[in-house]
Each structure stands twice: as C-alpha cells, then as structure tokens.
Image (spheres, rainbow, N blue to C red):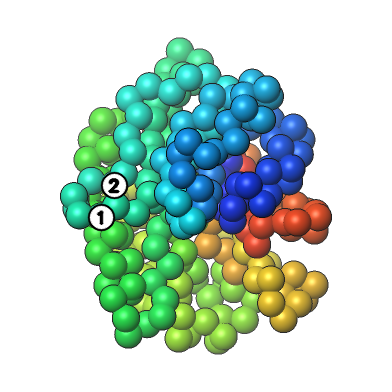
Amino acid sequence: MIIATWNINSIKARLETALAWVREAKPDVLCLQELKCETDAFPATAFEELGYTCTIHGQKTYNGVALLSKSPPEDVRRGLPGDVSDTQSRYIEALFPFGKRIVRVASIYLPNGNPLGTEKFPYKLGWMDRLHAHAKRLLKLEEPLVMAGDYNVIPKPIDARHPEAWVNDALFQPESRAKFRELQTLGFTEAVRAMAGDQPGLYTFWDYQAGAWQKNNGIRIDHLLLSPQAADHLKAVRIDKHVRGWEKPSDHVPVVITLA
C-alpha cells in the first residue's frame, strides 16, 4: 500500500502538476494540504478519471486538506476535535481497506505559527496539544494509523540546510519541536528517519525566494507518523525531490511510504 503526503500549495494553480505526479506514482492514498479552495470547488473530476475517490475538507483562499484514494473511505472525520470555535480546515481522517485489514490515514496541515509574538504561535501550540490528545485516543484503537502531512516543524538541526537561519522562526522554536517529540513519544514512528537514520540533506520544502531550490537550501517539515501497527509493515520511504524541478511546482514535494 502506497501512502503519500503533499502540500500542493493551491490545487487549482498546480492541477496539472498534481495529475502528472499521481499518474507517475500511483499512490493508493494521497494526503493533500493547502488546497486553497472550498470543498465544492475542488477539481474532483480530474482525479476521478484516474480512478480516485476525493474526500475533501476545503476552505476558501486558505488551508484545506484532502484524502484521494483508490478505494472509498469509511469513518470520515473532518476537523480536529477539541475546539468547536476553530473553523480552519486543517485536518481530515478516514479508514481504508488494507488487504484483509484496514488502515486509518489522516491528512494534517499544522498551523505555521509565524510571526512570533502574535496570536498565531499560541494557536499553533494549542493545535498541537489538540492533535496530541486526538492521536492518543486513536492509538487506543490499536489500528494501523498513518498521520501524514505538513507539520510545519523542523524536528532537528539536521533537517535544515542552514538551521541557524531558522532560529527566530516558529517552525524551529524549542516549543514546536518539543511538542512534535511529545507526539512521537506516544508511540509513533517517524517514517523518514526510521528508514534513513541521520542521513543529512533530506528536505521536503524549498522556498520560492532567493534561489533556495537551486542552492538546495531546504528544510524537512512534511512527515508521516506511523502507529506501531503501521510501522510493523513499513517497507520503504522516499522523498520525490525531482517534482520540485517541474514546471509550476509547489514549494513542497511528495513524501511517500510503502506498507508491505
């Protein structure tokens, strides 16, 4: 089973890029983030023609997450529980068949948190607390669970080409990194590091500015966290870096796991 996550940075602006990658990679489940369109405006027909069911939690102009799957989802949840006043579309999860089993997959677009010193950073940390509480509940189900998405967290200095450039950024604050570690210590396996160890130079995001892509000035902020039941089946992981060099690319690239 191939599961991928990708912050597409506007599905309408990058539709042809997204379709080209789906044709190439043929994921069983694709978690998309930052759709930047309402649910009804998502170009579902284009993906349905490729054999995918589109499960969307959209929002006008900002945010938006989706699950594209070769099989219809069950037990769909839109929105992260814990704060009924939060109307931002940043979380969606569902169950999918996995051989004789099922796998629960969540697509996550964690708040950026910048600029520091504004209400955006406490919102990020509060959102991470809610994610921690929800993930803890999901782990009690003892299902194969993959929580994939743009976490907007640089876990360690090795995950940035120039970590010193990020010390005043919400993505690299001690509080953000600590809450990401707390999430992992619930029992999750972080797929890329589980397979690649401390290999440097593994990035998933390159800014559009200052020639970041050409200089390989990247960071790794797109992660797949696996429950023990999913980690037991982890066979392979890759970062499709080449997609960043395509025409009209997102500033993120797909991260892909294979469950045996």
Looking at the picture, how far across and down is residue 185, in whole percent?
32, 55
Q: Is residue 247 left or right of residue 184?
A: right
Look at mark 2 in the image and give the residue it sits on.
80
Secondary structure state at the residue bearing disc 1: loop
In front of the other: 115 or 161? 115
Looking at the picture, how far across and down is residue 86, in whole percent?
25, 55
Q: Is residue 246 left or right of residue 14?
A: right
Residue at 54 percent of width and 24 percent of height: 53
Q: Are marks 2 and 1 in contact (CB under 8 Å)?
A: yes
Residue 206, numbered circle: none
Callout 1, which amino acid? Asp
Q: In the rendered image of this protein, does residue 114 appear above or below residue 4?
A: below
State which quarter of the image contains the N terminus. top right
Q: In the rendered image of this protein, does residue 57 appear above or below residue 185?
A: above
Q: How many marks?
A: 2
Residue at the far top in the pictured view: 100
Residue at 62 percent of width and 27 percent of height: 45
Callout 2, which amino acid? Leu
Looking at the picture, how far across and down is residue 213, in whole percent?
74, 70
Residue 86, numbered circle: 1
Q: In the rendered image of this protein, does residue 25 appear above or below residue 248?
A: above
Looking at the picture, how far across and down is residue 100, in whole percent?
45, 13
Foreground label between 2 and 1:
1
In front of the other: 211 or 195? 211
In front of the other: 249 or 234? 249
Secondary structure state at the residue bearing disc 2: loop
User: How would you rate the neighbour count of disc 1 (Cα within 10 Å): few for under 14, some for 14-19, many for 20 or more?
Assistant: few
User: How would you rate the neighbour count of disc 2 (Cα within 10 Å): few for under 14, some for 14-19, many for 20 or more?
Assistant: many
Query: Can I make out residue 88 in this image?
Result: yes
